[in-house]
Image (cartoon, helix red, strand yellow):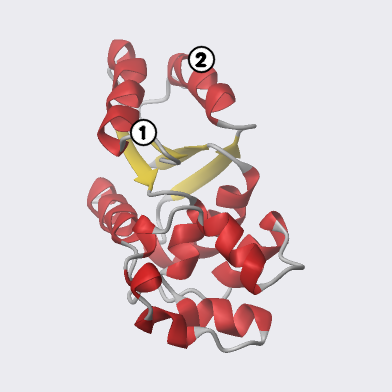
Amino acid sequence: MTIIFLLEEKSMKEVLDIILPQILPPDICYKTIPHSGKSDLQESIPHKLKAWRQADIKFVIVQDQDSADCRDVKSKLQELTKPYQREVLIRIACRELESWHFGDLNAVSLAYGKDVRALKLKSKFRNPDNIGNPKDELRKLFPKHQQLDGARRIAAYMDIENNTSTSFNYFVSGIRKFCS
């Protein structure tokens, strides 16, 4: 079986290319395809679902929630996939990919060489999926943070089994179930 990951942006690809080998069974092949934002991703979905016709192909769509209602985001993506009757798993990164990073403050600390684990004691950081703008929060902590480089650096240290981001944990458990 092959899983095609349709992603909103390149930074998600950077993270998934590092963590998917830890999540997927070894006999599963995968391809991560980044897009240039949500509009590009959503325009691409019908074309990709229509074009890939092999029987052993499944799709995973990953998009950021940003400020939208995550149920609305997921519903819109489901509507785009419906006509193609393909096996599709949709996962929403609540609020942004960077929330997944804040779910593993040890990985962030190791990636940047500065211990920020005490942030989990602050109410703002207890539930990383509720951080208003996690991308900005990372830049406040690390002014030289660059999205792609930061994604790679943090993902290299992420502990798949110990992340406090609920949307990250739904992603991991969803992928594992999708493969079985």
SS type, badge 2: helix
Across and down, in percent, residue 164 comes to 32, 70
**Image-based side of 131 in relation to 145, left or right:** left
SS type, badge 1: loop
Give the total number of marks visible in the rendering. 2
Mark 1 and mark 2 in contact? Answer it, CB < 8 Å: no
Three-letter code for the amino acid on which mark 1 is drawn:
Asp
Task: Judge whether residue 121 can be spotted in this image.
Answer: yes
Across and down, in percent, residue 68 comes to 38, 34
Query: Rounded to the nearest whole Å, what is the CA distance between mark 1 and mark 2?
Result: 18 Å
Residue 126 vs 63, above or below: the answer is below
Q: Name the disc covering residue 47, or none.
A: 2
Q: Residues within 10 Å of mark 1 (few under 14, many from 20)?
A: few
Three-letter code for the amino acid on which mark 2 is drawn:
His
Which sits in the foreground, 175 or 72?
Answer: 72
Across and down, in percent, residue 123 comes to 33, 73
Q: Residue at x 36, y 17 (%)?
A: 80
Q: Residues within 10 Å of mark 2 (few under 14, many from 20)?
A: few
Residue corresponding to mark 1? 56
The outermost residue toward the front is 123
**Image-based side of 128 in relation to 137, left or right:** left
Residue 27 vs 105, above or below: the answer is above
Residue 7 vs 76, above or below: the answer is below
Q: Residue at x 71, y 65 (%)?
A: 145
**Viewer-side label of 1, 2:** 2
